[in-house]
Amino acid sequence: MNIEQTLSSLRLHGMSSQWLGLKQAGGLANLSLSEGLELLLQAEAEHRQNSRTQRLIKNAAFRYQACLGEIHYPPQRTSIKNTVHMLSRGEYIERGQGVLITGATGCGKSYIASALGYQGCLLGYKTRYFNMQKLILRLNMARAEGTIFKFMETLAKTHLLILDDFGLSPLEGQPRLDLLEIVEDRHGQKATIIASQLPVSSWYDVIGENTIADAILDRITTTAHRIELSGESLRKNL
């Protein structure tokens, strides 16, 4: 068994690829043992980091690809640009804070929410994206299958949870209680992004039932960063 095969059998794929590249380029003779080992270890670390990032992005299940570099900021949106730039560092995720993005259809709220989620994956955070209606269906399915507690636990442990299209229809019965539990589990512990066509002031009516609405809104608005969009889309025309 040669060196490449040995490295591959040990699942050191980054090292194997680097070794093969050095061998083909004839660079092995020009490296000391320590220099060669440093290159191999660096290649393995980068390979594992890239693989983990790709897994995080796949598991996030974004509706479409989006990244912060594709966002266009007209002059009148300087404050939004500053807020997004601040959020791109990921400190809000570490602190378990929320981000509330509101705006009319087509102004870019879903795109910016997904772009922040993608950035979260690049920073190494476990991220999940859900359209609000599909989340309700997923909760109902988990309850019917007897896996609701496991699913709730998964949501509670997710570093960044994105709830898109919030408020398209009123919450009633069990979905309202489920949202309360999700918000309660994450409050001050994990970050949540909520995107909605409706202004935050209208969310009370969407949730309904005064006591539950008060509890939910108190938890998601207290330390949340707000992005209020209007006008044309933030996405560049590529």
Image (cartoon, rainbow, N blue to C red):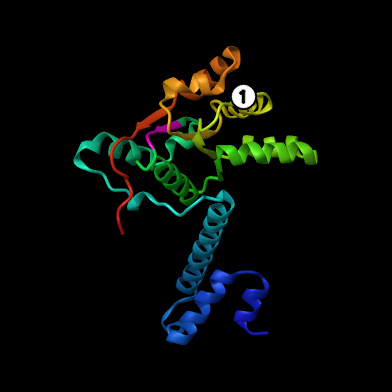
**On the rendered structure, is 81 left or right of 13?**
left
Q: Position of residue 209 (x, y in %)?
A: 60, 15
Q: Is residue 157 visible?
A: no
**On the rendered structure, is 1 left or right of 84?**
right
In this figure, which residue is indicated by the disc labeled 1? 180
State the residue at coordinates (65%, 78%): 6
**On the rendered structure, is 123 left or right of 82?**
right
Q: Which residues are magenta?
A: 99-104
Q: Magenta stretch mostly in which secondary structure?
A: strand
Q: Quarter of the image holding residue 90?
A: top left
Q: Quarter of the image holding residue 84?
A: top left
- With respect to residue 138, does 223 lie above or below? above
Q: Position of residue 175 (x, y in %)?
A: 65, 29
- Disc 1 marks a residue whose amino acid type is Leu
Q: Position of residue 31 (x, y in %)?
A: 43, 78
Q: Nearer the viewer, residue 36 or 113?
A: 113
- With respect to residue 181, does 60 lie above or below? below
The quadrant the N terminus occupies is bottom right
- With respect to residue 40, does 59 lie above or below? above
State the residue at coordinates (60%, 17%): 212
**On the rendered structure, is 79 left or right of 6?**
left
**Quick one: which residue is furthest to the left in this view?**
75
State the residue at coordinates (75%, 36%): 143
Q: Position of residue 216 (x, y in %)?
A: 55, 21
- Please tell me whether mark 1 sits on a helix, a strand or a loop: helix
Q: Nearer the viewer, residue 23 or 171?
A: 171
Whether 101 is among the magenta residues is yes
**Mark 1, other Cα within 10 Å: few <14 / some 14–19 / many ≥20:** some
The quadrant the C terminus occupies is bottom left
